[in-house]
Each structure stands twice: as structure tokens, then as C-alpha cells.
Image: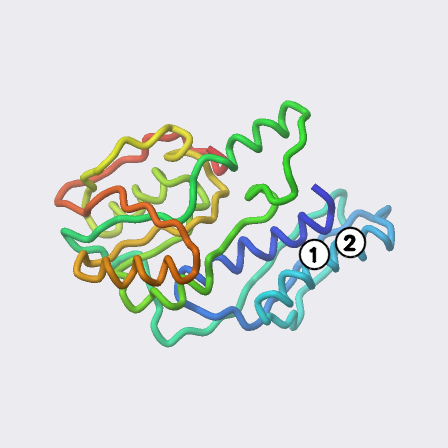
Amino acid sequence: MSLEQIAYKAMIVNISDAVVMNAKPKFALLGLKLPSNISKQEIDELSLGFKKACSEYGITIIGGDTVSGDCIDISITIISQTTNPIKRDGLNVGDMICFTGELGTVQRDLNILFEGGKVADNSKFINPILHDKFFYEVSDYLTSALDISDGLSKELSRLSKINSLGFAFFCELSDEELCSGEEYEILFSFNEKDLDKIIKIASKHSVKINIFAQAIKGSYETKCKENHFG
């Protein structure tokens, strides 16, 4: 990944947290640790990545801090606003469980990179897809939501623990789908009576949705190892 791509992704994955709470990101605080031998060109590349992400989502960088160190460290705080936050603790028995897009490609692409290969610039490992316009419109019908940063199975275990509920699966999901992290697709729940509305909104924004389970009494433990990438 180029420095521009790294900076862009660093900003996008923080914006993702705001989006899945139904919040509009407004401002960013940017903390950077930079090595003393970094060139002006490399700093310009980082700046381009940060500015690109902020421009796409209407965010203003209002401050932060820069220090010297032996490597590049990036720390970002997003300040966002919402009047109707979607949290993780609204799941009810009978709610349908769904995720957007496709899961597993990030883990596959990361393995390719580990083996010295190359992946396309539109790989979700390099350019996460947030589905923000879809989410903001569908939010009125959701009971809970979070982004899939640590893998679907891990996020399900979080929903289970917070809401003291389990899940009845409608289909079998592969280990890649369950465990691939850094996907930044959206995991959400909704009442079945709103299914037609959600399908219509998803179609309007060309977002694939996958309804794969239903909330039931019980519990769920993650089936994947504790690893951010799966």
C-alpha cells in the first residue's frame, strides 16, 4: 500500500464507526508520529490520503498533534453528530440478522500480500466500502448495528453478550465469511415487519444484503481466533 492509501484507509475505518451509529462525521483530530528521515514527498502523500477521505465525507481536520519517532503511527479521532443513534443493545428476540456485501475477500487478499503477491487497488483491504448513504436511509428501521472490523463471528459474539441473546442460522457460513476481519461491511438487525422496506432501500442504493440468522433466547460464542484480520 502507498502512504496515500494507508492514510485514506486510516481515516475511513474511523469514519465507519460514526456511520454505523447513524452519526454524520463532522470533524477529525489527527495524531501523527513521524520518523525524522521522512521526506516532504512522503508527508505530501499522507496528506493526500487524509484530505481525500475528509473531502468525500465533508469532514474538517480541526487539530491534533505531531511528534517524532522511529516509525509512522497514525491516530484519528472522529467527532460526529446524530439525533438518533443506532446502538448495539437494541436487539430483540425474533429480529432478523443481516450483513451487507460479501465477506471473506479481505482475508484472502491479505494472505496474497503475505505471500508477496499483489491485489487490485479496489480490494476492500485497501479501500473499505462503508455504504453510508444506504445506512442513513435504512436506520429508522434498525434495532442494532455495528461494522465488521474483527470478523462476523466476533461481532455476533458482541451482540450476543450485550443483548443476552443467541442466533438461529438460516444457512451455513464459511470460515472465511465468519472470521475475515477488516471487512467494514455492516452487521445489523431489524424487525421482520420492516423487511420489504429494507429490501427496497438496499435495491435503491445497489447494496447487497444477506439475511442469515434470527435472534433467539440463548448465547453465541465466536468460532474464530482472536485476530483482527481473521
At label 1, which amino acid type do we have? Answer: Gly
Q: Do the residues labelled 2 and 1 touch (CB within 8 Å)?
A: yes
Give above or below for 87 relative to 109. below
> Which residue lies under the disc numbered 2?
45
Q: Where is residue 161 in the image (x, y as percent from the top left)?
A: 25, 46
Image quadrant where one finds the N terminus: top right
Image-based side of 29 in relation to 151, left or right: right
Image-based side of 66 in relation to 196, left or right: right
Give above or below for 140 relative to 163. below
Quarter of the figure with residue 89: bottom left
At label 2, which amino acid type do we have? Answer: Glu
Give the CA separation, mark 2 to mark 1: 7 Å
Which residue is painted at 22% across and 62% down in the image? 194
In the drawing, what numbered circle is on residue 49? 1
Q: Residues within 10 Å of mark 2 (few under 14, many from 20)?
A: some
Which residue is painted at 55% across and 44% down in the image? 124
Q: Position of residue 141 (x, y in %)?
A: 27, 65
Q: Nearer the viewer, residue 174 or 87?
A: 174
Which residue is painted at 21% across and 38% down in the image? 170
Secondary structure beneath disc 1?
A: helix
